[in-house]
Image: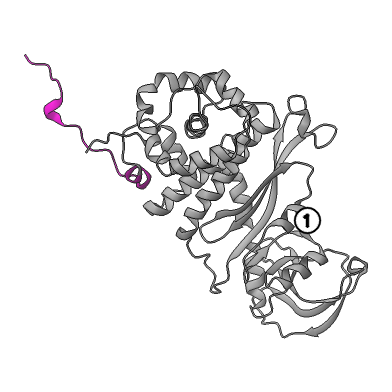
């Protein structure tokens, strides 16, 4: 069966136009746009993410040659000068707000995180997106490097990035982490870079649990040594009270300290948590699952166009990254709805070759072969 709309048009239909227009009006500066619109901008940048376009000229040329296929998207081809001007001048906050709207649609499709406990599980980390210091001096990180930083709280229920912040590279990881409002009863997993006893106390007061690594020189007092089940890699399970110099001005906290030996790597780890009811081995497995956020950062850097930028200003860079993250959510949504076993990386590769193809989007995501052409309509050579 043939389809009258392209894969690109079907994806864009997942973005409610009335909501987009409302956000565009809210996040607008300067005079009213006449020849182009924020929807034209979004369509161009979204298409560039899917099809791998690397420059303004490349985007303009592709949209010009595919202008007949843009009818169902509600967008028009946009000149590179107009696109550059919108990227420079119109606030990137439109796409940050759009990300939050799309996220709310995805949250109802989350799956299980694989552990027996029902508490939501989040991995927390940040990753630098490298930039050229000569081209992006506003993003200076040190004397030789420039970067922006992506902060993410990844929900293990479907590996959905539910908490996201985009900042200059010099912004401390912990500052953004403190701004994330994790739901009551959830478990947050983070590494040593987030050690802050005051923050631990604040999370506990909010009924949020955490699992993290203990710093080497942490000062504490053992309150209780608990029985360790042999053969599970757990070397100690203690109730401790932090009382070191880092606790100055903060009431002493009682936490759980779990020692673990990883037989695969031969390394020893020490974890701190305020979750007392789970087994010590489960605490170790929770921290081990934190590796998923490293895989998330690797996947988006490999598959989204956030390594070469089509604008040099801070607003242009932020615009491109937020549109890329919106594209990731739309693909996540299609993966969840289609129930395909294909990875998001695999879907990106398939879509890159079918952006303007008239194929059913869900069938394409599931890997369903295209229908056989009608032989009665084929021309043959008669003798």
The residue beneath circle 1 is 193
Left or right: residue 251 compared with residue 123: right
How far from the left and from the top, in percent, is residue 102?
50, 49
Name the residue located 29 percent from the left edge and 41 percent from the top edge: 369
Q: Quadrant of residue 80?
A: top right
How far from the left and from the top, in percent, is residue 287?
66, 64
**Foreground residue among 45 and 160:** 45
Number of callouts: 1
Magenta residues, dominant SS class = loop
From this view, report whether residue 203 is shown above or below residue 126: below
Tell me the magenta residue range.
362-383
How far from the left and from the top, in percent, is residue 43?
47, 32
**Foreground residue among 97 and 8:** 97
Which quarter of the rendered picture does the C terminus lie within?
Answer: top left
Name the residue located 42 percent from the left edge and 39 percent from the top edge: 12
One can see residue 303 in this view: no
Near mark 1 (Cα within 10 A), the count class, few <14, some 14-19 or many ≥20, is some
């Amino acid at each position: 069966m043939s389809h009258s709309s392209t894969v690109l048009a079907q994806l864009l239909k997942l973005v409610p136009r009335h909501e987009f227009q409302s956000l565009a009006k809210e996040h607008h500066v300067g005079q009213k746009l006449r020849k182009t619109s924020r929807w034209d901008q979004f369509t161009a940048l979204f298409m560039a993410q899917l099809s791998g376009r690397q420059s303004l000229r490349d985007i303009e040329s592709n949209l010009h040659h595919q202008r007949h296929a843009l009818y169902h998207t509600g967008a028009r081809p946009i000149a590179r000068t107009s696109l550059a001007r919108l990227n420079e001048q119109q606030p990137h906050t439109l796409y940050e707000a759009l990300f939050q709207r799309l996220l709310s649609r995805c949250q109802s499709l989350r799956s299980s995180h694989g552990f027996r406990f029902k508490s939501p599980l989040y991995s927390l980390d940040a990753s630098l997106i490298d930039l050229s210091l000569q081209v992006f001096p506003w993003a200076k990180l040190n004397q030789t490097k420039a970067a922006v930083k992506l902060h993410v709280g990844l929900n293990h229920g479907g590996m959905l990035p539910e908490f996201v912040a985009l900042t200059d590279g010099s912004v401390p990881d912990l500052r953004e982490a403190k701004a994330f409002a994790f739901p009551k009863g959830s478990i947050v997993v983070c590494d040593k870079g987030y050690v802050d006893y005051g923050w631990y106390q604040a999370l506990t007061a909010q009924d949020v649990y955490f699992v993290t690594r203990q710093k080497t020189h942490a000062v504490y007092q053992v309150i209780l040594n608990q029985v360790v089940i042999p053969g599970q890699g757990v070397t100690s399970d203690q109730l401790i009270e932090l009382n070191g110099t880092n606790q100055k001005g903060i009431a002493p906290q009682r936490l759980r300290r779990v020692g673990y030996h990883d037989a695969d790597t031969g390394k020893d780890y020490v974890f701190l948590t305020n979750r007392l009811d789970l087994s010590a081995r489960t605490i170790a497995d929770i921290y081990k699952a934190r590796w998923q956020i490293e895989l998330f950062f690797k996947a988006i850097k490999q598959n989204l166009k956030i390594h070469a930028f089509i604008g040099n200003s801070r607003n242009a860079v932020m615009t491109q990254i937020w549109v890329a993250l919106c594209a990731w959510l739309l693909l996540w949504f299609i993966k969840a709805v289609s129930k395909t076993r294909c990875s998001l990386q695999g879907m990106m590769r398939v879509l890159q070759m079918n952006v303007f193809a008239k194929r059913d989007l869900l069938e394409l995501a599931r890997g369903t072969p295209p229908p056989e052409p009608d032989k009665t309509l084929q021309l043959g050579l008669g003798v």
